[in-house]
Image (cartoon, rainbow, N blue to C red):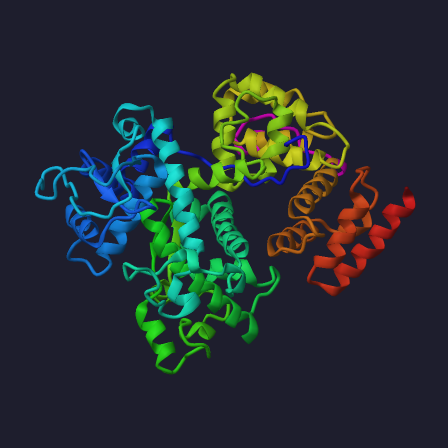
């Protein structure tokens, strides 16, 4: 519970700060930036914007061991820019005679004329080895912001075609761009990337497989950005939108992976070639992955086929980085363990918003600070009530009590006669094999049934309708003879609402009709 109107995302588990700091140091982009900052030695002559000359850039790539790679110069340039953006390098203006001699290979100096300043190691460089993990993470986050901005910005050739050599040195002059005349909305591009990372964050928090490290198929992530939530089988138009989104995300994630925020398996180049060459399976637009129309539910049964369309997941460092950005945007982004010192009521109120694994760890951390008996009594007390949220608290209470041991027995026996808690107490005692557990009355059974369904409806929202709810409704109704003739009499605030929901989701038409009649009788009863 946030106590305000801020948007909220589910809680996540983060690595310890020291582990995150080590991951940041090991990320390719930051580690390369640090190596170039040390390589600068007594100084490297640079242009007005801190850019390296062609000769210096080639030597920087060689220093990083990238000189033989196809994109080696581009990677070296990004690493150099990251060093400048993070303060690992700083520019000192001089009279054009700074820097060490070009023949001094050990220092990496650049004796070329015409530079506008000298790049030297900055104050932040010492923090990478001598600072606290928090210092390292601050530097990494500065680099991440620059990487995100780069990923959201299209290449010049995408905007203009191959740019001409407008500058005196034969390089394109960025200052000559008229952004207002270009088909590019920087804010929209940044929001699109933020949305994709936000969806990955929520999937990591709520999907047990993704939480455990499974990668998300790129079509699934792209569909989450552009397809209606309730669409099971996409139309051709939606598939086209998904293809376009996949191309954007593929380019962006390729650029972001060196920053350590994502693990990414790119779209198979053969799929793009098939589309460009007009091979069978093309979605109709050059440059878009071919064969996406075969994934009519955004995921193919063959895992290898899915992987060809790209796979992505947030790294633990990326989870930390996205959370920091969410916090800065005013989003309430809790961490598992935040509730360890809170009351039982706060715990039970918050648990429905947790993913399965996060809820289990949150409960374990809360229980670890209390004796089993004390914890059980607190939980049971917090589960009482007739307010709208009470059924969800009781469902969360059952979830938390399932992790307590036999030492909590006496707390459960104390509430056997309680109309709200007696049913769940009997379930707990019976599941653990305790003797002398009294059988529940029919009234208690029906009350617990309504309460359980009310909790499930509140958890699902929008009137329910999930397959899980359908199975629960069918199972509960089929267990008891004359269920709908009796259940409308249950003295529970949600009886009418529950019966109305049962009439919507029960697969049997006669049972659905009986549920509607029972709902009417329950509401007429007042």
Residue at 44%, 72% in the rendered image: 292
Q: Is residue 235 among what the camera can see?
A: no
Q: Which residues are magenta?
A: 429-443
Residue 247 lies in quadrant: bottom left
Can residue 227 be seen at all in this image of the molecule? yes
Could you say which is closer to the camera, residue 12 or residue 117?
A: 117
Location of residue 116 with respect to 502 vertically, above or below = above
Q: Residue at x 32, y 40 (%)?
A: 84
**Image: 131 above or below 487:** above
In the image, is residue 432 part of the stretch drawn in magenta? Answer: yes
* Horizontal relation, residue 30 to residue 424: left or right: left
> Percent x, y for residue 512?
76, 60
Q: Residue furthest front?
A: 95
Judging depth in this view, the residue of 46 and 322 nearest the camera is: 46
Return the x and y of residue 38 as percentages of the image width and height.
20, 35
User: Which residue is more in the foreground, 234 or 105?
Assistant: 105
Q: Is residue 167 magenta?
A: no
Whether residue 118 is situated above or below residue 275 in the rendered picture: above
Give how far across and how far down residue 267 sits, in percent.
35, 64
Q: Quadrant of the C terminus?
A: top right
* Residue 359 point in image, percent of width and height: 52, 35
Residue shown at 42%/79% (left/top)?
282
């Amino acid at each position: 519970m946030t106590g305000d109107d801020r948007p909220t995302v589910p809680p996540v588990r983060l690595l310890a700060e020291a582990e995150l700091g080590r991951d940041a140091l090991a990320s390719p982009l930051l580690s390369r930036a640090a190596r170039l900052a040390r390589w600068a030695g007594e100084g490297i002559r640079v242009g007005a914007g801190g850019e390296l000359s062609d000769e210096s850039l080639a030597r920087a790539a060689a220093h990083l061991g990238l000189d033989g790679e196809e994109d080696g110069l581009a990677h070296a340039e990004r690493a150099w820019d990251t060093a400048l953006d993070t303060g690992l390098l700083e520019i000192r203006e001089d009279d054009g005679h700074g820097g060490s001699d070009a023949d001094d290979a050990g220092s990496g100096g650049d004796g070329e004329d015409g530079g506008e300043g000298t790049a030297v190691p900055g104050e932040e460089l010492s923090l990478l080895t001598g600072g606290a993990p928090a210092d390292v993470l601050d530097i990494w986050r500065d680099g991440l912001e620059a990487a995100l901005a780069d990923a959201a910005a299209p290449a010049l050739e995408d905007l203009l075609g191959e740019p001409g050599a407008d500058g005196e040195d034969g390089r394109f002059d960025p200052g000559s761009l008229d952004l207002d005349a270009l088909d590019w909305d920087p804010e929209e591009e940044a929001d699109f990337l933020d949305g994709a990372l936000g969806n990955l964050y929520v999937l990591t928090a709520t999907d047990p497989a993704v939480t455990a490290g499974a990668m998300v198929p790129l079509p699934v992530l792209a569909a989450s950005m552009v397809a209606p939530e309730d669409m099971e089988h996409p139309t051709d138009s939606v598939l086209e939108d998904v293809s376009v989104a996949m191309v954007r995300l593929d380019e962006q994630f390729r650029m972001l992976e060196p920053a350590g925020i994502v693990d990414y398996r790119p779209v198979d180049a053969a799929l793009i070639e098939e589309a460009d060459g007009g091979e069978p399976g093309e979605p109709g637009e050059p440059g878009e992955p071919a064969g996406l129309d075969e994934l009519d539910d955004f995921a193919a049964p063959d895992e290898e086929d899915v992987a060809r369309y790209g796979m992505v997941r947030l790294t633990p460092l990326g989870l930390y980085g996205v959370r920091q950005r969410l916090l800065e945007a005013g989003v309430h982004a809790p961490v598992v363990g935040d509730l360890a010192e809170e009351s039982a009521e706060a715990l039970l109120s918050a648990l429905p918003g947790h993913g399965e694994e996060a809820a289990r760890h949150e409960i374990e951390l809360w229980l670890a600070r209390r004796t089993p008996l004390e914890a059980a009594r607190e939980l049971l007390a917090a589960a009482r009530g007739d307010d709208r949220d009470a059924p969800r608290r009781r469902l969360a209470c059952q979830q938390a009590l399932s992790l307590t041991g036999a030492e909590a027995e006496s707390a459960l026996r104390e509430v056997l006669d309680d109309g709200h808690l007696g049913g769940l107490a009997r379930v707990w005692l019976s599941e653990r094999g305790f003797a002398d557990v009294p059988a529940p009355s029919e009234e208690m059974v029906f009350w617990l049934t309504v309460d359980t369904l009310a909790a499930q409806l509140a958890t699902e929202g929008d009137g329910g309708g999930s397959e899980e709810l359908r199975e629960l409704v069918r199972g509960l109704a089929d267990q008891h003879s004359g269920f709908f003739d009796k259940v409308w009499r249950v003295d529970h605030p949600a009886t009418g609402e529950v019966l109305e929901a049962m009439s919507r989701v029960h697969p049997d038409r006669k049972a659905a009709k009986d549920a509607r009649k029972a709902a009417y009788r329950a509401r007429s009863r007042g």
